[in-house]
Amino acid sequence: MTDPSTAATVTPHAFRPESDAPLPAPVAWDGDAVTYLDQRALPFEVRLESARTVDEIVEAIATLAVRGAPCIGIFGAYGVALLRRSIPDDAAFAAAAARVRAARPTAVNLGWAVDRVLGAEDMLAEAQAIHREQEAIDEAIAQHGLELIPRNARIITHCNTGPIATGAGGTALGIVLAAHRAGKNPHVYVDETRPLLQGARLTEWELRLAGVDAVLQIDAAAAVVMAREKVDLVLVGADRIARNGDTANKIGTYALAVLASHHGIPLYVAAPRSSFDFALESGGGIPIEERDPREVTSFGGARIAEESAQVFNPAFDVTPRHLITAFVTEFGVVRPPYHESISALEKAREVLRLSR
Ligand code: MRU
């Protein structure tokens, strides 16, 4: 195993406010713990926490202290590497790793990253490799995505796909940040993203820190914005993409895709290859996480409905492939017909591995 004292932590380059005050990395290896930026406290408090035990690791993921598909993959990978050190008994370790793997069901990145670490000789080195790779992947996604962003683009985004969601440069928001750095002057309409407000709390904050022109709106305002504001594109992330292109992402993405189609606006999904589930033929097989009803019956800590109200609270929905104009991956822009282009993406990984 790698000596923790020599283990590098990764600080995402894009995760810097304009003031230059250093912010902690969303996830980092700390030798005897995995540290993380508690996203529940943002944007009002930059709170750094550490997880050491399986309960702490699972809780951080399940409560969305650490969130975003690639970021929970990296966190889970470090978590399992850490638990291998602290749990010598093989059966107990396997049970702990299984709990981490199942902490959230929809994002395929978590299971993918945990399995990669479990299959490695040196688990910590593998977790660090996954983290480092995400930097290069996000950078490549940003570069490929730039071609889709016109100058002065008006972009609607949903949920949060920035640096804190990937532990690196971000996916959909990484493209927006790259467009901003390239002088393209993007203007972003940020869906607040009910019920946990990742758009209001996190995306608006990340765009503000980067100096990107952003307007916060309630999710239901997307239709009128599309009708009136000459929106150029919708740009979102993904938690799991089936072989045929059906895509699970934050609840509300499907509604946005229907609206975009109605208004003739392209919708792009930016996601790394690790968000594709090549074992799944279509979106019907994607497990959708249903969360605590109290996320819906309360708002900002205040109750807004009877606690006994019957509630439907899926954390994700599935956007059918025909509503998706293209995917932006680290290998390039993937366009329909998806049964061909997504199969090619699966093989592209093998080519990349050979070249390493
Ligand atoms: O429940 P969350 O906040 O983890 O959901 C996050 C999303 O739906 C993101 O769009 C997705 O994970 C991509 S993050 C780059």
Image (spheres, rainbow, N blue to C red):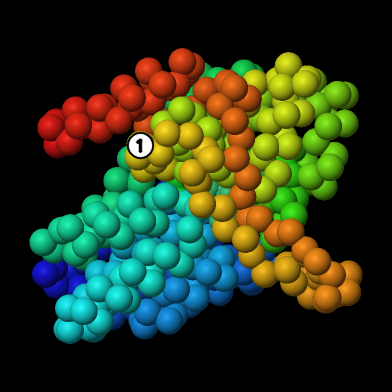
Q: In which quarter of the image is the N terminus?
A: bottom left
Q: Residue visible at 44% across and 59% down?
A: 72
> Residue at left 36%, top 56%?
111
Using residue 169 as the reference point, say whether residue 28 is left or right of it.
left
Q: In which quarter of the image is residue 298?
A: bottom right
Amino acid type indicated by mark 1: Phe
Residue 242 at x, y = what percent? 45, 36
Name the residue: 33% across, 69% down.
Answer: 98
Residue 164 shows in the view: no
Residue 170 in the image, given as x and y percentages of width and height: 49, 44
Residue 65 appears left or right of 92: right
347 up-or-down from 76: above or below = above
Badge 1 residue CB within 8 Å of ligand 1:
no
Residue at which label 1 appears? 278
Q: Is 178 situated above or below 25?
A: above
Closer to us: 223 or 356: 223
Q: Which residue is drawn at 67% across and 48% down?
A: 251
